[in-house]
Image (cartoon, rainbow, N blue to C red):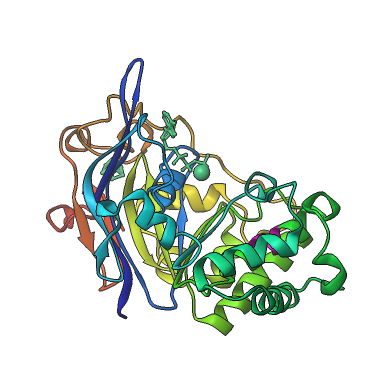
Amino acid sequence: MEPILQVKDLQVSFQVKGGEVKAVRGMNFEVGKGETIAIVGESGSGKSVTAQTIMRLIPSPPSIIKQGEIIFKGEDLLKKTEKQMEAIRGKDIGMIFQDPMTSLNPTIKVGKQITEVLIKHQKMSAAEANKQALEMLKLVGIKNAEARFNQYPHEFSGGMRQRVMIAIALACRPALLIADEPTTALDVTIQAQIMDVMKDMQERLGTSIILITHDLGVVAGMCDRVIVMYAGEVVETGTKWEIFKNPQHPYTKGLLRSMPRLDQKKGEPLIPIIGTPPDLIKPPVGCPFAARCDHAMKICERIDPGATEFSDTHTARCWELHPMAKEGNSQ
Ligand SMILES: Nc1ncnc2c1ncn2[C@@H]1O[C@H](COP(=O)(O)OP(=O)(O)OP(=O)(O)O)[C@@H](O)[C@H]1O
Ligand code: SF4
Ligand SMILES: [Mg+2]
């Protein structure tokens, strides 16, 4: 599949009082045209920092992009000026955050917030933009769209506001949509509706999506591939079935046991991963999961395992999976 986005050896740090927080420590991944990839991982693993770096939305300072390339449509986003990024955000790359109230302007009517994007990026006339904005509101399932067009964000429920955000993010038909926990703040039935809207819109528009989520049901329902992040690194990546049916990395296995699943039996408890992620001011030199891993060996603490390939799409970083450790491997 032709990649629309390639993230190459991305390293992002934050300068804080106690030193440098190495939040993203060498991310590599691609997103194909029309593909949906999920980024999963515990809190603090670097998912949002990765997403916001792609959009160049992290203020610097305190952030420092230490290294890497973010190739979007053949050009490195890290080399763009702020002015160039402004032209790309909302037009070629859309973004939806967890809390639409922080991204919607409370003082501007909802319809106008969509038309503004269309006028800015698509150079539409006001009449064309109004027509298109109304169409978008209908497409994301807002009833009485004509009346809703002239209302303010506070007149909408949380789920309806998130639909508006999707309408804004997709108004210019961006090639890529980044959604960072778009439904976390909503209740479960509304979450499912919002995910349906996103999926439906993707099918209509062919948008590629990077979806950050804590919900494996959502991953199963709409993603093609999964990236599992831990301590600022990709520890495992594969198609969703490779990750669900044949997880290899001890962290992925633990994460799957700790996150809600579709086939979860009622009352079946989630099993948290014991311990906490490493301090990213002084990240471990070896495997970052070693301090929490039941399978840890001496080598794990000293040397980074590197990636082992299981298929063209499936890789994981773990000494136990290393070809040299095949003998004695109980997998
Ligand atoms: N402005 C900042 N200053 C210092 N450290 C930061 C800053 N923003 C993020 N970090 C650190 O970067 C790391 C990655 O954070 P990030 O927000 O990407 O995590 P996340 O995977 O999105 O977690 P969550 O699931 O909770 O949203 C964390 O250790 C966090 O403390
Ligand atoms: S490399 Fe070692 S510590 Fe890391 S996940 Fe594999 S077995 Fe566990
Ligand atoms: Mg986050």
Indicate yes or no whether the magenta region holds residue 164: yes
Indicate yes or no whether the magenta region holds residue 125: no
Residue 93: image x %, image y %? 45, 64
Q: Residue furthest top?
A: 17
Depth check: give the residue in front, 83 or 40.
83
**Vertical placement of residue 160 versus 224, above or below:** above
Residue range of the region highlighted in magenta in the rendering: 162-166
Residue 16 shows in this picture: yes
Question: Which residue sits at x=34%, y=52%?
Answer: 249
Type of secondary structure dominating the magenta stretch: helix
Question: Which residue sits at x=48%, y=33%?
Answer: 274
**Vertical placement of residue 141 versus 90, above or below:** below
Q: Quadrant of ligand 1?
A: top left
Q: Is residue 315 left or right of residue 97?
A: left
Residue 318: image x %, image y %? 26, 49
In the rendered image, which quarter contains the C terminus?
A: bottom left
Question: Which residue sits at x=22%, y=32%?
Answer: 301
Q: Is residue 189 left or right of residue 287?
A: right
**Vertical placement of residue 61 versus 86, above or below:** above
**Vertical placement of residue 271 versus 201, above or below:** above
> Total marks drawn?
0
Residue 143 shows in this picture: no
Residue 269: image x %, image y %? 66, 46
Residue 112: image x %, image y %? 71, 62
Q: Is residue 59 left or right of residue 308?
A: right
Q: Residue furthest left?
A: 324
Q: Residue furthest bottom?
A: 204
